[in-house]
Amino acid sequence: MEKKISIDRIREASEDIKKAVHRLRLLGEKSLEEFLSNEDYQDIARSRLLIAIEASINICYHIVAKKLRRVPDEYGQCFKILGEEGLISKGLAERLSLMCGFRNRLVHLYWKIDYQLVYKVIHSHLSDLELFVDEINAFIFK
């Protein structure tokens, strides 16, 4: 028997992602030099990236547990399961899986973060988080 997906939980986490991405896009307007010379910008970027990635993971685990009745071994595998089941596109699943590795570096190696890479993620991968929200919402609210 399929357990019920919490629409409120999905909606709240989706809003967390959208708000974090919005704030990150504002930071992305700074030049690389300005970003790298300002520890507050770096701290905000790290925090907002963690919020967005963690909210994505929360959504992923919730759907995989409730809809598919599975428990992934690791964060990245959760997105791959959604991709394999056709709930999100496989390309997006792969990119989000890789983002989980980036999340682990932000959490566990925070004293050794490459902020040039953080800046690159802000400029190149925020759309993956937005696309995840769009694809999940299309699945949930179909």
Image (tube, grey):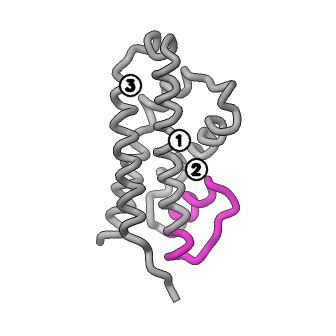
Q: Are marks 3 and 1 in contact (CB under 8 Å)?
A: no
Q: Amino acid at mark 2?
A: Ser
Residue under the image location 45 percent in, 37 percent down: 125
Q: Is residue 49 above or below residue 15?
A: above
Q: Give residue 28's mark.
A: 3
In the rendered image, residue 87, in percent from the top left (x then y), is placed at 44, 66
* Helix, strand or loop at mark 3: helix
**Dot 3 alpha-carbon crowd within 10 angstroms: few under 14, some 14 to 19, many 20 or more:** some
Comparing labels 3 and 1, the label whose residue is closer to the camera = 1
Tell me if residue 94 comes above or below residue 112 in the rendering.
below
Q: Residue at x 51, y 61 (%)?
A: 60
Disc 1: which residue: 50
Badge number at residue 15: none
Separation (CA) of disc 3 from disc 1: 16 Å
In the rendered image, the vertical position of residue 108 relative to residue 66, given as above or below: above
Q: Residues within 10 Å of mark 2 (few under 14, many from 20)?
A: many
| Local secondary structure at mark 1 | helix
Q: Earlier in the sequence, mark 3 or mark 1?
A: 3
Quadrant hosting residue 71: bottom right
- What's the residue at 30%, 70% (across, down)? 141
Magenta segment boundaries in residue numbering: 63-83
The residue drawn where x is 47% and y is 29% is: 44
Instruction: Give amino acid for label 3.
Output: Gly
**Residue 97's disc number:** 2
Name the mark nearer the viewer: 3 or 2.
Answer: 3
